[in-house]
Amino acid sequence: VNQGFCIAYDFAVGSRSPAGLPRDGAVVPKGEGHQRPVPPDRPGYYADLVRKALPSFYAGDLFEVVPSQVIYRPCDRKPSEVFNQLSRMNPSPYGFLIHLGREHLVGASPEMYVRVDGRQLETCPISGTIKRGRDALEDAENIRRLLNSEKDEAELTMCTDVDRNDKSRICVPGSVQVIGRRQIERYSRLFHTVDHIVGELAPGYDALDAFMTHMWAVTVTGAPKLEAMRWIEAHEETPRRWYGGAVGWLNFNGNMNTGLTLRTIRLVDGVAEMRVGATLLHASDPEAEEEETMVKVAALMRALSPEAAEERKGTFQSTSGKGRRVLLVDHEDSFVHTLANYVKQTGAEVVTVRWEAAHALLQDNRESFDLVMLSPGPGRPERFQMAETISLCLARHLPVFGICLGFQGIAEYFGGQLGVLPRPAHGEKSTIRILEKGRLFDGLGESMPVGRYHSLYVQALPPVLKLLAETEDGIPMAFEHREYPIAAVQFHPESVLTSSGDNGLKLLDNVLRHLRNDALHKASTIG
């Protein structure tokens, strides 16, 4: 929902008002050039801070602590340009641009500090971070990892318990409640876990009391709060300045809405200063915590560069099928149209027909094809007379690629044996080990996640078929013929579970590039 609103404050006393008065003020030009040196990055500095903190957890002095480091970059851009770009790239609940004379603050903070509406007091402590993936599938996996992390859960639990303690000083007994637990918030570069805590202000307390009671937030200090602040004071090399403070408004009716000054750039003398931290506890890994700080600062650094204004996520593109005609044999399959979609993305022409019609086309020499694909389908290969389909392909020297049921049909045709899995793999993701690249896995990794839909499996491959990939428990997942351009996969390259990194598209691109009929001059004698 798009909303627009305007807030205006016009003062009048009797007949007197500011209407018509000139609205002028001093103009302070932006400083030009790099007026001071830019301090270099210090790889390993933050990891060393983590190592210094670890003994305090085991000694019982600290439960958690949030030290920070500063990243510096040159910046000749106008503060308004940085702010506008940051707002586009990394929309956040608390965005701000503040002119402070010779310095500016540009921020995109994800975290509420204190919000008061009437008698209700709210906070949303954030702790628990993981980077974004390359696509929605990797995002889902990273969210799963974040929610399953006991370390990240402990971080947020301690923050929430301290926050509840802060509220209990000024709230009606029994009113402090956690109404949201480990909720996921998404930003351009990372995911956070967030709790939502409310309380009712007791008589005699107002928004300013709430603001002061929570100074300073546990998510930027630690617990116990005083001990954590002492540790930070002793170990951080530079003052925090605005970092960990708050920005927002106090209304005339007593309401308040403030956000923490996190993910904030301090622009001064042509240098951008970006302070960032992470929540440490006894289970912290020094290098991982340092990496987390760099993930958090990534969006800020991109906002400093004009060329980063438009960020695009590339998708795999192929022309391997251009000029080629593919016959896709439909075995009453639920995924055949997505398969055709993928093959068409390579530039190929796709003719999709049911298996009976495919037999007629293959017997008609007037129809010309460069590749035959055998689709998935229910039941066993003989239900669709797949052996006859394969024989017709071989008689015409046509390359063949099988998927799922097609994989089973090709294996059985050349002498393989089929069995039944102890437990069906329907809509399941498995990681396969790629044993040989062969014709299918050129440009792919040593392993990859795939989507499976099968109850039958190939128990034993015949000698003429070379195993290319298998599951972690040894179920064959891909093979190719040792002489002829014939290959197959048990998994579904068109499944959403195989789409991470465009792996399914890349595999089909390999099929179109490498399965050609120049090796099939003897094929008609097979079978």
Image: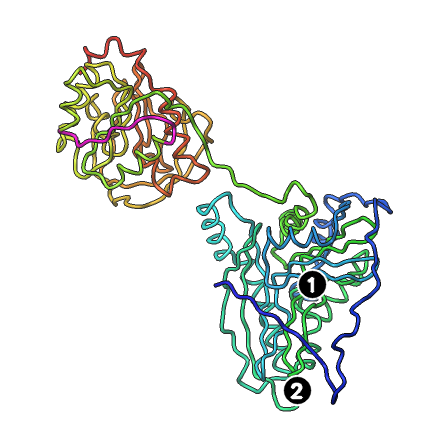
| Relative horizontal placement of residue 18, taking residue 145 as reference (left or right) | right
Which of the 4 quarters of the picture holds residue 199? bottom right
| Relative horizontal placement of residue 323, taking residue 522 as reference (left or right) | right
Q: Residue at x 34, y 30 (%)?
A: 343
Q: Residues within 10 Å of mark 1 (few under 14, many from 20)?
A: many
Q: Give the x, y percent position of residue 133.
A: 51, 46
Q: Which residues are magenta?
A: 345-356
Q: Give the x, y percent position of residue 301.
A: 68, 47
Residue 355 part of the magenta segment: yes
Q: Which label belongs to residue 261? A: 1
> Which quadrant: the C terminus?
top left
> Disc 1 residue type?
Thr
Q: Residue at x 73, y 84 (%)?
A: 12
- Pick whichever of labels 2 and 1 is earlier in the sequence: 2
| Relative horizontal placement of residue 414, taking residue 110 as reference (left or right) | left
Helix, strand or loop at label 1? It is loop
Q: Residue at x 66, y 84 (%)?
A: 206
Q: Residue at x 47, y 63 (%)?
A: 1
Name the one closer to the observer, 12 or 308: 12
Which of the 4 quarters of the picture holds residue 169? bottom right
Q: CA distance from mark 2 to mark 1?
A: 25 Å
Which of the 4 quarters of the picture holds residue 128? bottom right
Q: Which label belongs to residue 205? A: 2
| Relative horizontal placement of residue 16, taking residue 203 as reference (left or right) | right
